[in-house]
Amino acid sequence: MKAMILAAGRGERMRPLTDSCPKPLLSVGGKSLIAWHIERLARAGIHDIVINHAHLGHLIEETLGSGREWGVNIDYSREGEALETAGGIATALPLLGDVPFLVVNGDVYCELDYATFCARALTRITQGQHAHLALVDNPPQHPDGDFVLDASGQVLREGGARLTFSGIGLYRSSLFAATEPGTKAKLAPLLFKAIDAGRLSGEHFHGRWEDVGTPQRLIALDEELKRRSAA
């Protein structure tokens, strides 16, 4: 299985930090956000990774290189300007192939076990789902959530307590078939279409997850991880 780490965003809310450093390279607990993901992917046995980039993308390539440091192989999908999530994935499909692949937002911190998540997700994909998402409790900055998860594991628009999309999911490449490579396209319309077709499943992740969207949240997470390592 291959994984894609989304790393093309500008990180406007992180300025001025992101004026000179791509957001996924910002450090928490002594490692960059993206390095935490690469380590966890490697530990899960996922060694082929695609990373897209736009803003200061050369710094991402210079820092991560081929991925040899982590025992993985990294390919890069270079975007002249950020293409949004669906546009970035559609553009990277030649590197990802036709089998289901994992996608992770590069600017979140998450302690999800990718190996067990992917195993469960692949089961749902083989049963006909177009994608399988990891959903989390609504954070203070996003209290209304994104989707509803029913008792059978189907993702719905409405009909119950809402959860927040973590930015982590397993996808069929066919979900992006109608998205023109090299064009900007958001992911949400594709997910809503899958929901309406009854083809989007998910699970509720109860572990540590953080959308590192502001300097304040970056500092708080950094301090938390440093306390843990010192304990």
Image (cartoon, rainbow, N blue to C red):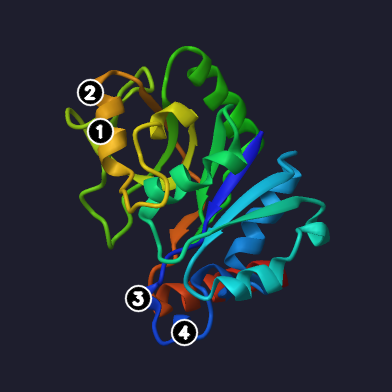
Mark 4 or mark 2, earlier in chain: 4
Q: Residue beneath label 2, please?
A: 196
Amino acid type, residue under disc 1 in the picture: Phe
The disc placed on residue 138 is none
Kindly check if marks 3 and 4 are in contact, taking CB atoms under 8 A apart as contact. Answer: no
Q: Residue furthest top?
A: 127
Left or right, 229 with reference to 180: right
x then y, percent, for residue 165: 36, 44
Q: Residue beneath label 1, please?
A: 192
Q: Residue at x 33, y 44 (%)?
A: 187
Q: Residue at x 57, y 33 (%)?
A: 117
x then y, percent, for residue 94: 57, 40
**Element type at mark 2:** helix
Gap in angstroms between the C-alphas marked 1 and 3: 26 Å
Q: Is residue 143 visible?
A: yes
The disc placed on residue 17 is 4
Q: Residue beneath label 3, please?
A: 12
Amino acid type, residue under disc 4 in the picture: Leu
Q: Is residue 61 above or below residue 37?
A: below
How crowded is the residue under tag 2: few (<14 C-alpha within 10 Å), some, or many (20+)?
few
Amino acid type, residue under disc 3 in the picture: Glu
Q: Residue at x 57, y 35 (%)?
A: 101
Gap in angstroms between the C-alphas marked 2 and 3: 33 Å
Kindly check if marks 1 and 2 are in contact, taking CB atoms under 8 A apart as contact. Answer: yes
